[in-house]
Image (cartoon, grey):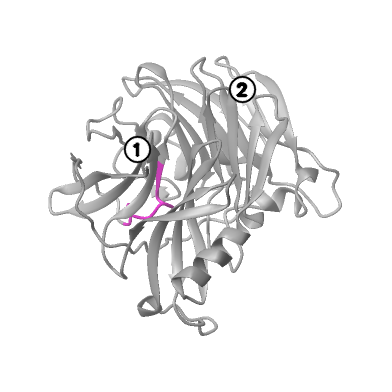
Amino acid sequence: MRFIRGLLLVIVASYSTRFAAQVPPQNIEGAESPQLHRWDATHGVLFLGKNFLLEKTAPPLRSYNEGGLQYGSDVNLFKDFPDVENVIVDDFAAGTAGATFIAATLIYGHGPAKHVLLTYDGTGGLRQVVDTASYSAEAITSDDQGDVYVLGEKTDEREGDPPYPLLIEYDPSGTIVGRAIDSKVFKTGSDAIQDFGPAQEMVSASLMVSDGKLYIYAPSERQVLICSLDGKILRRTALEEFTVKIARADKVNRAAISEIAFVDENHVALYLTEHVDPEEPHTTDYSNMHTAVYLVDLTSKTFKLILRGEPGLNPAFVGVKGNQVLTLTRTQHGFEIQQHDLF
C-alpha cells in the first residue's frame, strides 16, 4: 500500500543567475519542496500542489512555464467532484494546448478512496475521467500524441502475489494501449518505485518521456532506467556508488538523494542532502545538513558540483530544462524561478 507523503523541508542557498522569472504568490505552504511541486521537463511546466492533502477550501491548482507565465487555466477539482472530502494529487503532466493531466486520489467521507487519471483542457474544463481501479500512480508523463504513461502499483497487492506491469500507457481516449516494466525487474518488486529511498528519505519516483524513450527513477533501489516506449530496458544504472563517492569527496558522513532530474541519456542532476556528521537516531538536526546539486555522467562515472547550499535558505531544486538546472526561490512577491548552467 502507498503512504501519504510527508512534508519535506528543503534547504539550499541562493545564487546569482543570469535569468529570473516571477511566479505569483500561492496559498500553498511548503511549495519550495520538490515533494510538493512537479516540474514537467518534457513540456517545460511547473505545477504546484503535488502531494498535498487538499481540502474543499484549497485554492485552485495552477501551473507556470519557466518564464513565470501561467500555463493553461486554474483547475478546481472540488467543483468537478463535489462529493469528495479531500484530494491527494499524486502527480501532474502537461499536454498540448494548455491541457493538464492529473493522477489523483479522491477521498470520500465514506467508502474507499478512488484512484483516477483526469484530463483538463486549457480553459480548466474537465474533459475525461479514467478510473484506474486498484492501481495508484507514483509518477506520470505524457508524449506529443497525447498518450499518458502511468508508473504505479496495485493498492491491493499482497505478499506473494505474482509480478505485474508497473507502467501503463493510456491513449487520448483513456484506453489502455500498453503495459510494461514488470515488477520482477526490481529486487524489491513494486516497492522499488514507492516514494521513499534508503533511510526513509521520502524521494518520489520520476518518469519522463523524451526523444522516443522513457526515463524512470526507482527511489527505493536508487536506480535509473532508460527504456524504449514499449518498456524494453536500454540502460540501467545504480546511483549508490555516486553518492558514496560524492560524500567522500565532500568529506561528509552521508549524501542522501532528495531528488533527481534527467538531463539526457548520459547525465542526471542529483539534488543531495549531505549529512556532515553521523545522525542521531530519530532526530532531525538541520545544522548538521547542507545541500548540493551535482551533474553526474553515467558513462564516465564522473560528477561535477553545480550548486551548494546552507540550511534554511533558498532556492529549492526544481528540475532541468535543456542544459540548465532550475531552482525555485520564495520572495515577498511569490516565487522566483532561476536558471543555472550545467555545462
Label 1 to label 2, Cα distance in Å?
Answer: 22 Å
Q: Is residue 209 among the parts visible in the rendering?
A: yes
Quick check: is 34 in the magenta stretch? yes
Dot 1: element: strand
Give the quadrant of residue 154.
top right
Magenta: main secondary structure equals: loop
| Residue 323 position in % (x across, y down) | 37, 37
Q: Residue at x 45, y 61 (%)?
A: 272
Q: Which mark is residue 46?
A: 1
User: Which quadrant would the C terminus be assigned to in this image?
Assistant: top left
Q: Which residue is mark 2?
A: 170
Q: Which mark is residue 75?
A: none
User: Disc 1 vs disc 2: which is toward the camera?
Assistant: 1
Is residue 129 shown left or right of residue 226? Answer: left
Q: Residue at x 35, y 33 (%)?
A: 45
Quick check: is 247 in the magenta stretch? no
Q: Which residues are magenta?
A: 30-38
* Closest to the observer, 112 or 6: 6
Q: Is residue 134 among the parts visible in the rendering?
A: no
Q: Residue at x 55, y 62 (%)?
A: 243
Q: What type is the residue that disc 1 sits on?
A: Leu
* Closest to the observer, 282 or 106: 282
Dot 2: element: strand
How busy is the neighbourhood of tag 1: few (under 14 within 10 Å), some, or many (20 plus)?
Answer: many
Give the quadrant of residue 175.
top right
| Residue 330 position in % (x across, y down) | 22, 54
How busy is the neighbourhood of tag 2: few (under 14 within 10 Å), some, or many (20 plus)?
Answer: some
| Residue 250 position in % (x across, y down) | 44, 70
Q: Of the two numbered discs 1 and 2 on the same chain, state the one appearing first in sequence.
A: 1
* Closest to the observer, 56 or 271: 271
